[in-house]
């Protein structure tokens, strides 16, 4: 029972794995046979105005085998130089005949042998039963090996023979050699230019290097053969001995019979307000209209790639983002037409900012709640979801998540309960994207701040209490002094006279001698008998 449960568990994991795998490869489009894999990169991912960014688009067509890929026209170029003499040459002819046997009735093959010169042994011939017999006979009748290696002459002849191939067929060159060029052109660039030209017509170039343990001073030039195959959208194979040639030719045949991608149309839509195309694409566009670059590729053979690289100059602070897919790839394959791929990344401005900030107070006490409002903006060209945080000095108080459409703003409110906070002076700030999660954002405008004084609790309420307590101590001496001064006559007699005139006769004291005064109503004056004068 436990074993059965384990099997069910493993089966469930496999099903989940398949489902997940289908979601993490959105750029691999499956046709009836094989796969078309598209990859696009932009480097660097962020550029300032005036800086250069490199764009690379790679379309790889895998095979899948099983036929259905249309007819194939193949040129087999066989080395018959002196170093091939003996068993190597016999094995090479046998491997070429095995390749012929793998072809279908709708296919055609041509045989070219080369030494110091290249010779067409058999023109393109259909590989039905009669054609296969004729081609095999032509291979058997290639003259015995002799002479030096004019490898460029062989490749040049094969490329020229491609003009005899059918435009609706996949066309290929299979160049097999056991050495390096010893006569004729030897510059690598000449070989790669020739192979690239063949690829530009929709053909593919395969190369096979045949080794020989007995040859140490002049082994096969693997580097050159690799570069020829790469430039020709093909592959390089190495056979340490002639025994491995059979398997290599069978493998190439299987790859050729995988379906190609045909009528491939690639459109790159560059935002001209953000970047400028530098007119330097490694594959010349078929047309250019504004910021739209367009390539028309007749055929990308199975198990080959089409690659273009070009540069742009940033007009603003630009970021490469996966959320934008400006590249459109449309192709036909294996009976399916107009298969479309929208390919990221693209160019965008990613810019968020804090526009303004206001707080409910500049001075509070511990335990009070501070309220802050902030207006934040998304100045970029794409929607953004980002974090906004409130900070006291460098301490993060709280954060919130904001989603904003491009070119839009919103207001956010933060509250800070200062209970448990030490009294002091604090720099209160509101910062968008405090964790720098938005690649390409300029942080110089992300923060707005203000100063806040936090005092001890009840500091602002104790002052009135102190005033109330101290007030009696200030008032009592003033009242006492006034009363004492009146008793001792410190006030002007004129004042008393006016007062007495309103209240009637009243004995007062002289302000000079402090003796009693007498009021004379007739004169309406006070008289001091001791000083003998009116007061």
Image: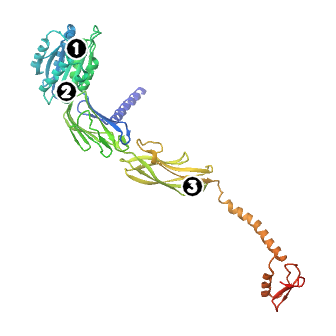
Left or right: residue 191 compared with residue 502:
left
Q: Helix or strand or loop: what does disc 1 sit on?
A: loop
Label 2 or label 3, whichever comes before in sequence order: 2
Looking at the image, residue 190 lies above or below residue 149: below
Of 417 and 46, the residue lying toward us: 46
Left or right: residue 91 compared with residue 368:
left
Which labelled disc corresponds to residue 198?
2
Q: Is residue 366 visible to the viewer in this orientation of the structure?
A: no
Which is more foreground, mark 2 or mark 1?
Answer: 1
Which labelled disc corresponds to residue 182?
1
Looking at the image, residue 117 lies above or below residue 511: above
Left or right: residue 371 compared with residue 206:
right
The image shows residue 143 at horizontal and vertical percentages of 13, 10
Label 1 or label 3, whichever comes before in sequence order: 1
Number of labels in the image equals 3
Spatial CA span between label 2 and label 3: 76 Å
The image shows residue 158 at horizontal and vertical percentages of 16, 21
Which is more foreground, mark 1 or mark 3?
Answer: 1
- Residue in the picture at 43% in, 27% down: 2
Q: Residues within 10 Å of mark 2 (few under 14, many from 20)?
A: many
| Residue labelled with disc 3 | 369
User: The N terminus is located in which quarter?
Assistant: top left
Q: Is residue 153 visible to the viewer in this orientation of the structure?
A: yes
Q: Residues within 10 Å of mark 3 (few under 14, many from 20)?
A: some
Q: How does the figure colour the protein chain or chains? A: rainbow
Spatial CA span between label 2 and label 1: 23 Å
Q: Residue furthest right?
A: 530
Which labelled disc corresponds to residue 398?
none
Which image quadrant is residue 200 in? top left
- Residue in the picture at 80% in, 79% down: 492
The image shows residue 331 at horizontal and vertical percentages of 22, 36
Which is more foreground, mark 2 or mark 3?
Answer: 2
């Amino acid at each position: 029972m436990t074993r059965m449960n384990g099997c069910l568990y493993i089966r469930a994991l496999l099903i989940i794995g398949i489902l997940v795998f289908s979601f993490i490869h959105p750029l691999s489009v499956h046709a009836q046979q094989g796969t078309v894999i598209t990859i696009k990169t932009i480097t660097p991912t962020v550029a300032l105005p005036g800086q250069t960014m490199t764009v690379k688009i790679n379309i790889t067509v895998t095979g899948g085998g099983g036929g259905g890929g249309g007819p194939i026209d193949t040129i087999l170029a066989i080395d018959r130089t002196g170093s091939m003499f003996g068993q190597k040459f016999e094995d090479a002819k046998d491997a070429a005949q095995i390749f012929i046997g793998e072809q279908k009735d709708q296919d055609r093959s041509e045989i070219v042998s080369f030494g110091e010169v290249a010779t067409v042994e058999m023109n393109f011939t259909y590989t039905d039963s009669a054609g296969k017999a004729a081609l095999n006979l032509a291979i058997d009748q290639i003259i015995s090996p002799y002479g030096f290696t004019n490898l460029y002459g062989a490749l040049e002849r094969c490329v020229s023979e491609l003009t005899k191939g059918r435009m609706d067929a996949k066309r290929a060159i299979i160049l097999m050699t056991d050495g390096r060029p010893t006569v004729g052109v030897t510059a690598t660039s000449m070989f790669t230019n020739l192979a690239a030209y063949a690829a530009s017509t929709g053909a593919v170039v395969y190369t096979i290097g045949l080794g020989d343990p007995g040859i140490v001073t002049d082994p096969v030039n693997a580097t050159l053969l690799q570069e020829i195959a790469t430039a020709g959208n093909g592959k390089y194979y190495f056979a340490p001995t002639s025994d491995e040639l059979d398997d290599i030719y069978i493998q190439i045949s299987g790859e050729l019979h995988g379906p190609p991608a045909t009528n491939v149309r690639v459109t790159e839509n560059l935002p001209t307000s953000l970047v400028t195309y530098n007119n330097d694409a490694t594959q010349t566009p078929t047309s250019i209209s504004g910021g739209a670059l367009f390539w028309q590729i007749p055929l990308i053979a199975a198990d080959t790639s089409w690659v273009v690289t070009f540069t742009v100059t940033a007009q603003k602070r630009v970021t490469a983002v996966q959320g934008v897919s400006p590249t459109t790839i449309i192709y036909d394959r294996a009976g399916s037409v107009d298969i479309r791929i929208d390919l990221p990344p693209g160019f965008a401005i990613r810019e968020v900012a804090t526009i303004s900030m206001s707080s409910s107070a500049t001075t509070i006490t511990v335990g009070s709640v501070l309220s802050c409002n902030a207006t934040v903006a998304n100045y970029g060209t794409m929607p953004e979801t980002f974090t906004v945080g409130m900070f006291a000095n460098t301490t993060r108080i709280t954060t919130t998540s904001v989603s904003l459409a491009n070119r839009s703003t919103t207001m956010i409110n933060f509250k800070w309960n200062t209970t448990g906070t030490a009294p002091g002076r604090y720099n209160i700030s509101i910062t968008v994207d405090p964790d720098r999660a938005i690649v390409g954002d300029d942080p110089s405008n992300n923060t707005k701040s203000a100063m806040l004084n936090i005092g001890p609790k009840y500091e602002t309420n104790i002052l009135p209490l102190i005033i109330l307590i101290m007030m009696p101590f200030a008032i009592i001496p003033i009242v006492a002094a006034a009363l004492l001064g009146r008793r001792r006559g410190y006030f002007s007699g004129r004042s008393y006279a006016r007062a007495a005139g309103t209240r009637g006769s009243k004995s007062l004291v002289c302000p000079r001698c402090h003796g009693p005064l007498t009021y004379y109503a007739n004169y309406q004056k006070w008289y001091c008998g001791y000083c003998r004068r009116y007061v």
